[in-house]
Image (cartoon, helix red, strand yellow):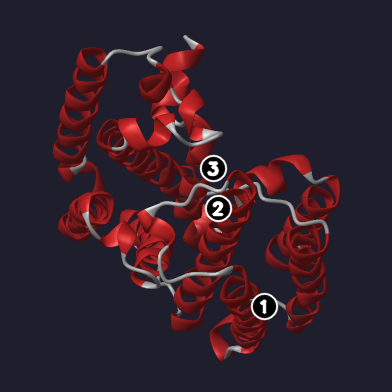
Amino acid sequence: MIKYLKLLRVEQWIKNFFVFVPLFFSGNITNFDLLGKSIFAFIIFSLAASSIYIINDYSDIESDRKHPEKRRRPLASGAISKRTALIFLFALISLSIVLVYCGAQYFHHNFWKFATIIAFYFFMNLAYTFKLKHVAIIDVSIISLGFVLRVLAGGYATGIFISQWAILLTFVLALVLAIGKRRGELINAQISGKTRKALDGYNVQFADIALSVSCTLAIVCYLMFTLSPEVQQRFHARVFYTVIFVVFAFLRYLQQTLVYNKTESPTKIIYRDRYIQITLVLWVAAFLLQIYFK
C-alpha cells in the first residue's frame, strides 16, 4: 500500500492546499458551501498532480536509478512495474476528467475557468517533464506558476476575488521553494560527483543569491498585500503585524539552507523543522483572529 502512495507522491499534496488560500483570506472558511467547493478543487488538483508525478517518474526511470535518493522511488527501484504505473496513470486521468465533468453542475458560471486551469496545469507540466525542466530559470518559473494556478483554481471554484498582490506573493513564495530545491540538488551533485542536465545553468553561488533575493521579494510582497486597501478594509489594520511571523519563517529557512546546508527539499524541511511549524501555526492563529475576531 505504501509503495502506491509513494507512486502518487501523496506527501506532495500539501502543495495543493494553496487551493484553500482564497477561501482562508476571504474570511469564508466557515462557509460550508464554499469549503465543499474548495475540497472538490483540491481533490481534482491532487489527482492531476499525481498523474504528472507518475509520468515524470516513468520518463526518468534510468536517471533516477543513478540518483542517491530518487533510486528509492517505486518505479526506479522496481517496486512497481511500468505496466502497473500506466494503469494508475490511466485511472487518475480518467477520474480527473469525470470529476471535472461532474463539476460542471457544481461550479456553475466559473466552471470553464476552473477546467481551463486544470488543463493548462496538466499540459504545462507535460512540457516541463519532457523538455522545459532542463532549461534553467524557466524550470523554476514553471514550478512557481503551478502554485499560482492552484490559487487561481481555488478562486474560480469558489468565485472569490484574488488580489494581484496575493498572486504575486504566491509566485515569489513558490520561487523560493523551487530555488531551494535546486540548491539542494546542486549540493548533492557536488557530494556524489554526479550531476544531471536539469542542473545546467545553475551553481551554488547563483542559487544562494537567487534564494536570498526571492525571500526578500516574498517579504516585500507580503507587506504590500497586508497594506493593500482591500485587505485593510476587509480585516483589521493590525494584520500588518503578522509580517513578524513571515520574516522569522524565512530567516529560519535561510538558516537551515545556507548555514546548516540542509539539502532536503523545502517541503521536507517544513515537515521536520519544529521552529517553522510553530511559526506557521502562530501565523495562522494570528490571521484567524484578524479575520474572525475583529
Q: For the residues marked 3 and 2, what is the alpha-carbon distance in whole angstroms?
A: 21 Å
Quarter-of-image position of residue 39: top left
Q: Quadrant of residue 192?
A: top right
Mark 3 surroundings: few (<14), some (14-19) or many (≥20) residues within 10 A: few
Q: Secondary structure at mark 1?
A: helix
The residue carrying mark 1 is: 212
Front residue (pair 169, 98): 169
Q: Is residue 15 left or right of residue 86?
A: right
Q: Nearer the viewer, mark 3 or mark 2?
A: 2
Residue 250 falls in which quadrant of the image? bottom right
Q: Residue at x 70, y 41 (%)?
A: 271
Circle 3/circle 1 CB separation < 8 Å? no
Q: Secondary structure at mark 2?
A: helix
Residue 126 % position (x, y): 21, 50
Q: Position of residue 221 (x, y in %)?
A: 59, 83
Q: CA distance from mark 2 to mark 1?
A: 17 Å
Regarding mark 3 in the picture, which secondary structure is present there?
helix
Q: Relative to 246, is 120 on the left or the right?
A: left
Residue occupying the point 52% across, 74% down: 172
- Label 2 vs 1, first from the N-terminus: 2
Tell me the residue that label 3 is attached to. Answer: 14
Q: Quadrant of the C terminus?
A: bottom right
On screen, residue 100 versus residue 62, left or right, reads: left
Residue drawn at the location 41% of the way across and 12% of the way down: 79
- Lower position in the chain sequence, tag 3 or tag 1: 3
Q: Tell me the tag on residue 185.
A: 2
Residue 240: tell me if it is visible.
yes
